[in-house]
Amino acid sequence: MATEFELTPAKTVDLENSIMLGDSERLLKLLQNDFVDLTVTSPPYDSLRKYNGVGDTWCFEKFKEIANELYRVTKPGGVVVWVINDKTDRGSKTGTSFKHALYFMELGFNLNDTMIWRKTNPMPAVRQPRYADCFEYMFVFSKGKPKTFNPIMRKTKFGGKNYDSTAKNMDGESGRHKLKYVVNSEAVDYNVWDIAVAQNKTCHPAVFPYELAKKHILSWSNPGDLVLDPFAGSGTTLLAARDLGRNYIGMEMNVGYFSLCEERLFGTKTCLENLKEKT
Ligand SMILES: C[S@@+](CC[C@H](N)C(=O)[O-])C[C@H]1O[C@@H](n2cnc3c(N)ncnc32)[C@H](O)[C@@H]1O
């Protein structure tokens, strides 16, 4: 039976490549200042899910405690990717996603980008006076300027073609000058990512796609860096981090999901063999 993680003399600082059972509000306090290169995580969305009772304690005050710790443990130039959405409560979106983003900025994080995960296979819409929901926010916060950016590239439509045109002069004078260049075959990817919702073969209700974690880890960290997920759930971020040669630390409060993380990472159960999506 798994027991709550405690720091003992035998487990002093070597927390890398471990999954800890417990409340991340407490566990984050065990990490040193300026320790983590990248956090990729998804907290509970309002009170949308209960996570077997864990969701009952989730509130804005608790979020703030965890956000404070995330700021403290993030290295200068480190990044926090916060994947989140709002619940609809009595006809209104809660706006919690924005409240979180503004609080992170109050702490001193830069809002490096507001990215969108567009679901290519969203849930069918129920009849409501609004358009069908098909995305989640991916706020990218950085402690100062991001120290790592390995952009994912996309092929350009007119790559390799000659661009031959004229443009207005920049000196404020009237007139135009000739422009002539060859269009690059690749450009930095857009900040809206189309990714299918993970086919959930686990007992976890809110697994995010392996591809989503993978793309962020590739973008904002290098091999050997430390990747954190303080709401590990089924361990998607940790799995992708390990596959990409990064170190990882996971925290999960629910004992069942904690065991699921261990099974996914250390492969003890055959029913989970096909869990990792092929990307
Ligand atoms: C949205 S899910 C994360 C899913 C994860 N990204 C995945 O792919 O499986 C949020 C998780 O955070 C856990 N959780 C909620 N509050 C927590 C806390 N204070 N400390 C640690 N884990 C917590 C819940 O049990 C749940 O598994």
Image (cartoon, grey):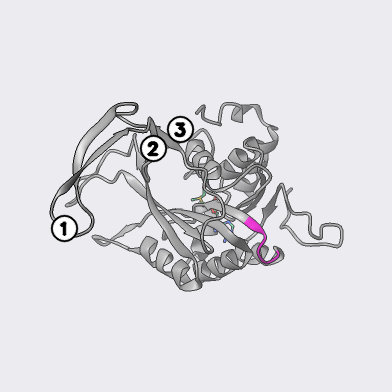
Q: Indicate yes or no: mark 3 CB to ligand 1 under 8 Å.
A: no
How many numbered marks does the figure carry? 3
Q: Earlier in the sequence, mark 1 or mark 3?
A: 1
Q: Position of residue 64 (x, y in %)?
A: 51, 70
Instruction: Please state the extent of the stretch shown in magenta in the rendering.
Output: 32-36
Q: Amino acid at mark 3?
A: Gln
Q: Residues within 10 Å of mark 1 (few under 14, many from 20)?
A: few
Q: Residues within 10 Å of mark 3 (few under 14, many from 20)?
A: few
Q: Is residue 83 above or below residue 119?
A: below
Residue that label 1 marks: 173
Q: Is residue 272 above or below residue 143?
A: above
Image side of residue 247 versus residue 102, left or right: right
Q: Indicate yes or no: mark 2 CB to ligand 1 under 8 Å.
A: no
Q: Is residue 234 something that shows in the picture? A: no
Circles 1, 3 touching at the beta carbon (< 8 Å): no
Image side of residue 198 versus residue 257, left or right: left
